[in-house]
Amino acid sequence: MIVMGLSKSERQNISDAYAAVILLERYFSTQGLGTEIILPKSLELQEKIKNGARVDPDFDPENIETHSEVVLLSLSF
């Protein structure tokens, strides 16, 4: 992909974002079946993964509304 007027790092960020979208699309289309978690070699990073995500004070999982439709996010580059 050649985008005129963008630096190499900006083009890389666009490519990374596109790859993330493709990865998430494949994950959700298969409902996560066959997904494997690959842990990093760093023990410190492995511990962070095992400890889980930080608690978000603005997020209350007990008040999640269930929706039958899928919400699509649009990314602008």
Image: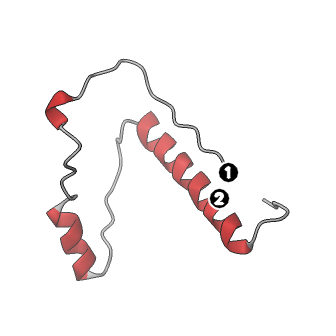
Point out the residue furthest to the right here.
Answer: 4
Q: Are marks 2 and 1 in contact (CB under 8 Å)?
A: yes
Q: CA distance from mark 2 to mark 1?
A: 7 Å
Question: Mark 2 or mark 1, which has the lower sequence index?
Answer: 2
| Residue found at x 20% / y 59% | 54
Q: Quadrant of the N terminus?
A: bottom right
Circle 2: residue type: Ile
Badge 1 crowding class, 10 Å Cα cut-off, few under 14, some 14 to 19, many 20 or more, is few
* 40 or 17: nearer the viewer: 17
Residue bearing the label numbered 1:
77
| Residue found at x 65% / y 59% | 14
Coordinates of residue 47 in the picture (x, y in percent): 18, 73
Q: Would you say 2 lies left or right of 19 here? A: right
* 55 or 58: nearer the viewer: 58
Residue 7 drawn above or below residue 35: below
Coordinates of residue 30 in the picture (x, y in percent): 42, 36
Q: How is the image coloured?
A: secondary structure
Circle 1: residue type: Phe
Q: Would you say 46 lies left or right of 69 here? A: left
Residue bearing the label numbered 2:
14
Q: Which mark is residue 25?
A: none
Residue 27 drawn above or below residue 62: below
Residue 59 drawn above or below residue 62: below
Badge 2 crowding class, 10 Å Cα cut-off, few under 14, some 14 to 19, many 20 or more, is some
* 7 or 38: nearer the viewer: 7
| Residue found at x 23% / y 65% | 49
Q: Secondary structure at mark 2?
A: helix
Point out the residue furthest to the front here.
Answer: 58
Q: Secondary structure at mark 1?
A: loop
- Tell me which corner region of the image, top left, top right, bottom left or bottom right, holds residue 44: bottom left
